[in-house]
């Protein structure tokens, strides 16, 4: 066989599907895989082909030629329908040749643990990355608007939280997707220190130069504020109940998941705050 025929018979490289590929951790995973020269398919409603957790008819096309998946679930891994969706996704994915899955799960969430059991039941290499509240929730999601407005109101009381950096989560996921030695591992990840929300907001205020304060609120008050911001009532109630449950102290302790997976310490919240303040994201506008 000559070189030309060998080149013609070479199969196309298999892809890694990153679900929620434009989200907080997903887009970071995409970037890391791309930097490593790995072919990636960005799983999103705007993708080509599109991928939508709420539309199972989009899944097969997104899984074509895929052998590894970063599995992040929308609207949340703790949602009531998550386990059923992940079961159906797993049935389809294994039939199409997926051999490795990294699941983004939640720390101490009973519904998330059901999803972990589903993922472990399939004949692929699996890794679970359990996380809780991201540093970036203050700059890319829930509390960006409140930081800009000067008031972060959360049903968390004075409970401590070891906020984890999305960059660390992405590093762990990318390692599990591309390296050997991570199959069958559960990495529970956190930052190196626990802070109360009041302490975290104080750090943000000091670094950004803004006047920002924290105010503990009830579950009902938190849900109502989301509805006023345009979140559907049912979704607002689910998120408020989830936050209230998770901010009961169950995740206050730090963990060694980043160290075990990567051989280094996790990123400190203060370093995140300092670097984020330099981007100016907290300077823009006057609030939502």
Image: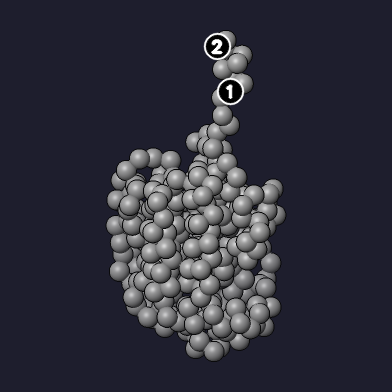
Of residues 234 and 195, the one drawn nearer to the viewer in this rendering: 234
Of residues 282 and 110, the one drawn nearer to the viewer in this rendering: 110
Horizontal and vertical percent for residue 245?
A: 42, 80
Q: Is residue 273 left or right of residue 281?
A: left
Of residues 278 and 120, the one drawn nearer to the viewer in this rendering: 120
Of residues 99 and 76, the one drawn nearer to the viewer in this rendering: 99
Give the structural element (helix, strand or loop) at label 2: loop
Residue drawn at x 29%, y 51% as measured from the top left:
260
Horizontal and vertical percent for residue 167?
A: 47, 52
Q: Earlier in the sequence, mark 2 or mark 1?
A: 2
Image-quadrant location for residue 233:
bottom right
Is there a contact, CB below 8 Å, between mark 2 and mark 1?
yes
Point out which mark residue 1 bears: 2
Q: Is residue 48 left or right of residue 182?
A: right
Which residue is identified by label 1?
9
Q: Is residue 39 above or below residue 192?
A: above
Horizontal and vertical percent for residue 193?
A: 33, 64
Separation (CA) of disc 2 from disc 1:
10 Å
**Label 1: few (<14), some or many (≥20) within 10 Å?**
few
Give the structural element (helix, strand or loop) at label 1: helix
Check the picture and name the quadrant holding the C terminus: bottom right
């Amino acid at each position: 066989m000559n070189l030309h025929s060998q080149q013609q018979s070479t199969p196309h490289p298999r892809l890694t599907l990153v679900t929620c590929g434009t989200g907080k951790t997903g887009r970071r995973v995409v970037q890391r895989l791309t930097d490593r020269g790995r072919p990636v398919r960005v799983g999103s409603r705007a993708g080509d082909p599109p991928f939508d957790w709420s539309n199972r008819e989009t899944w097969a096309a997104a899984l074509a030629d895929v052998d590894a998946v970063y599995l992040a679930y929308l609207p949340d891994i703790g949602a009531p329908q998550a386990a059923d969706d992940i079961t159906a996704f797993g049935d389809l994915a294994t039939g199409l040749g997926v051999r490795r899955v990294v699941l983004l799960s939640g720390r101490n969430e009973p519904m998330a643990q059901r999803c972990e059991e589903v993922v472990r039941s399939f004949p692929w290499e699996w890794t679970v990355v359990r996380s809780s509240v991201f540093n970036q929730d203050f700059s890319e999601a829930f509390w960006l608007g409140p930081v800009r407005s000067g008031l972060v109101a959360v049903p968390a009381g004075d409970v401590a939280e070891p906020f984890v950096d999305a960059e660390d989560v992405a590093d762990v996921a990318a390692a599990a997707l591309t390296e050997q030695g991570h199959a069958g591992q559960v990495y529970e990840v956190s930052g190196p220190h626990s802070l109360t929300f009041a302490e975290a907001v104080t750090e943000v205020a000091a670094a950004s130069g803004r006047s920002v304060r924290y105010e503990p609120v009830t579950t009902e008050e938190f849900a109502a504020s989301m509805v006023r911001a345009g979140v559907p009532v049912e979704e607002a109630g689910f998120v408020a109940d989830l936050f209230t449950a998770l901010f009961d102290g169950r995740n206050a302790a730090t963990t060694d998941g980043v160290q075990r997976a990567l051989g280094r310490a996790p990123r400190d919240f203060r370093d995140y705050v300092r670097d984020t303040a330099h981007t100016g994201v907290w300077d823009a506008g006057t609030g939502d």
